[in-house]
Image (cartoon, helix red, strand yellow):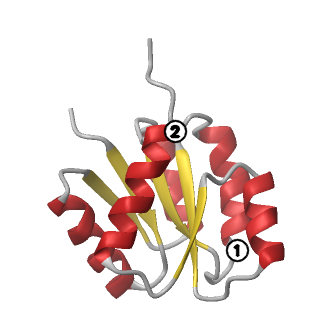
Amino acid sequence: MPKRVLIVDDEENIREMTRLALQAAGYEVGEAGTGLEAFAIVGSDELWDAVLLDQKMPHMLGTEILRRLKVMLPTARVIMMTAYASIDLAVEAMKLGASDFVRKPMTPEIVRNAVAAALAKSPEPD
């Protein structure tokens, strides 16, 4: 069964590029354009192995979405994505449970490597 990755980003072109890169590597991919959409997807289907999460989105910052996702999906690996990287933001994201932090713009290789590395840290279910 392929690993499942949820992409949460308000920019459709970023979601599409990321989805194509991950599908080419054999992942099953879902997409959400807002935090609320992500919560609805996760609420109806909790079988996500990883989440790629944008920091700067309308209505709700990625760190707030991360805080809630870690309650809803405690074992999922969350990788924060942002074009506005700072050390403070990276530290905050890691304290909230993010597995990794990648800077936009990202190449398909960066996306695949970040997801593979995050999933390698995941404990396998019994």
Disc nearer the start of the sequence (2/1): 1
Q: Answer above or below: position of 106 versus 27.
A: below
Hey, which quadrant is residue 113 in on the image? Answer: bottom left
Whole-percent x, y for residue 49 in the image: 43, 41
Report if the CB atoms under discs 2 and 1 are less than 8 Å apart.
no
Circle 2 residues within 10 Å: few <14, some 14–19, many ≥20: few
Quarter of the picture holding the N terminus: top left
Give the residue number, with chain letter if any, for mark 2.
121
Distance from disc 2 to disc 1, alpha carbons, whole Å, reads 25 Å
Element assignment for label 1: loop
Q: Which mark is residue 61?
A: 1
Q: Which mark is residue 77?
A: none
Q: Residue 102 or 78: which is nearer the viewer?
A: 102
Horizontal placement of 60 versus 53: left or right?
right
* Most distant residue in the top direction: 126
Q: Answer above or below: position of 42 versus 32.
A: above
Circle 1 residues within 10 Å: few <14, some 14–19, many ≥20: some
Whole-percent x, y for residue 104 in the image: 50, 84
Quarter of the picture holding the C terminus: top left
In the image, what residue occupies the spot 68% across and 79% down?
Answer: 59
Q: Residue 39 or 93: which is nearer the viewer?
A: 93
In the image, what residue occupies the spot 66% across and 44% down?
Answer: 70
In the image, what residue occupies the spot 65% across and 54% down?
Answer: 98
The amino acid pointed to by label 2 is Lys
Element assignment for label 2: helix
Horizontal placement of 92 versus 17: left or right?
right
Q: Residue 64 or 41: which is nearer the viewer?
A: 64
